[in-house]
Image: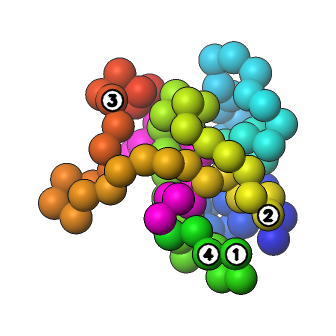
């Protein structure tokens, strides 16, 4: 799966075109970077607990604030896997300061 094609085809109605992050991102993160109207600057990632080697991960990609991804990521099979907590009641647990618009 080509990350840029996936991002454009899946989220085209939410994307803000030609938006770039404040500082250059590592190349492996840049592929999964986008700016969405609803979430701001994000990296599409897979939560560590959802990562399974043989699984098609397209349905497990979630928007993670760039700052959170930068602190918690590893690359596996070309995907960005983050070690972050998720609560069914509260959603993804990140620092408020990590959300950037």
Q: Which badge, 3 or 2, comes first in the chain's sequence? A: 2
What x and y, as percent, mark residue 67? 52, 28
Circle 4 crowding by C-alpha within 10 Å: few under 14, some 14–19, many from 20: few
Residue at 66% of width from left, 82% of height from top? 55
Left or right, residue 91 beside residue 37: left
Magenta residues span 38-49
For label 2, the residue is 77
| Crowd tier of the residue under label 1, counting other residues whose Cα lies within 10 Å: few below 14, some 14–19, many 20 or above | few
Circles 1 and 2: CB atoms closer than 8 Å: yes
Which residue does the image show at 41% across and 27% down from the upper left? 98
Give the number of the mark in front: 3 or 2.
Answer: 2
The answer to whether mark 2 and mark 4 are in CB contact below 8 A is no
Q: Secondary structure at mark 1?
A: loop
84 is higher (above) or lower (below) than 62: above
Measure the C-alpha gap from mark 3 to mark 2.
27 Å
Label 1: which residue? 53
Compute the Cα span from label 1 to label 4: 4 Å
Q: Residue furthest top?
A: 23
User: Residue 41, how many percent across, how many down?
Assistant: 53, 35
Report helix, strand or loop for mark 3: loop
What residue is shown with label 3? 95
Image coordinates for residue 30, horizontal then vertical, percent: 75, 39
Question: Nearer the N terminus, badge 3 or badge 1?
Answer: 1
């Amino acid at each position: 799966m080509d990350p840029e094609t996936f991002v454009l085809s899946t989220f085209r109605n939410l994307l803000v075109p030609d938006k770039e992050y404040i500082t250059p991102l590592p190349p492996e993160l840049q592929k999964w970077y986008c700016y969405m109207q609803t979430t701001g600057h994000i990296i599409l990632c897979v939560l560590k607990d959802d990562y399974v080697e043989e699984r098609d991960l397209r349905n497990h990609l979630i928007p993670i604030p760039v700052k959170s991804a930068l602190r918690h990521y590893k690359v596996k099979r070309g995907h960005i896997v983050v070690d972050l907590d998720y609560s069914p009641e509260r959603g993804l647990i990140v620092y408020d300061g990590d959300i950037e618009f």
